[in-house]
Amino acid sequence: MKKLALIFAILFVVVSCTTNNTIGSTKKSKAQPSLYSTQWTLAEVVKGKNPTMVLENGKISGNAGCNNYFGSFEMDTTQGSLKINNLGTTRMACPNMSAESNFLKILGETNRYIVNGEHLELYKDNLLLLKMIKLSK
């Protein structure tokens, strides 16, 4: 679990230091496809259970690495905005909860998304927070 926490920390630092040059100076976001009825997993392979995200009918759920989580989301496809609200989790005890806490914190900070083929990028303004890969149904 320590390796998972380290991977999340490194991923967060690396991603935080990069910007998306295609968005850069424009304040208006490009329209994005709907995320309804989609399933995603973290792009980075981590030891243990890979975090997942399922978006269905305004509800978000998945696994954060140890515990399952759930909440709601608001999406505006014309602006590419995504706001995740009211996150809650199951309460299983795990050896190291910091990676899971970081993942959930990042989800809560997300306010924008970009779909690029089979990849989903989650942003806070112009700061890339996470990259996820689409799962087949």
Image (tube, grey):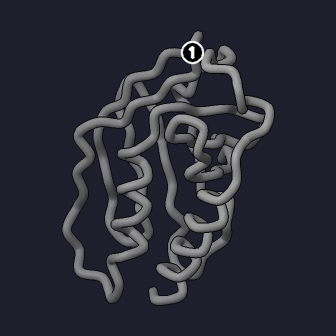
SS for tag 1?
loop
- Residue 12: tell me if it is visible: yes
Which residue, as the protein is rendered here, is positioned at the far left? Answer: 91
Picture residue at 51% right of the left edge, 55% below the top: 52
In the image: residue 46, left or right of residue 84: right
- Residue sitting at 42 percent across and 73 percent down? 99
Observer-nearest of 135 and 133 = 133
Quarter residue 43 falls in: bottom right
- In terms of depth relative to the viewer, which is nearer, 24 or 61? 24
Q: Position of residue 91 (x, y in %)?
A: 19, 68
The quadrant of the image that shows the C terminus is top right
| Circle 1 crowding by C-alpha within 10 Å: few under 14, some 14–19, many from 20 | some
Image quarter of the N terminus: bottom left
- Residue 50 picture location, percent across and down: 55, 67
Percent position of residue 123, x then y: 56, 41
Does residue 33 appear in the picture of this structure? no
Residue at image point 22% right, 51% down? 88
Q: Which residue is mark 1?
A: 79
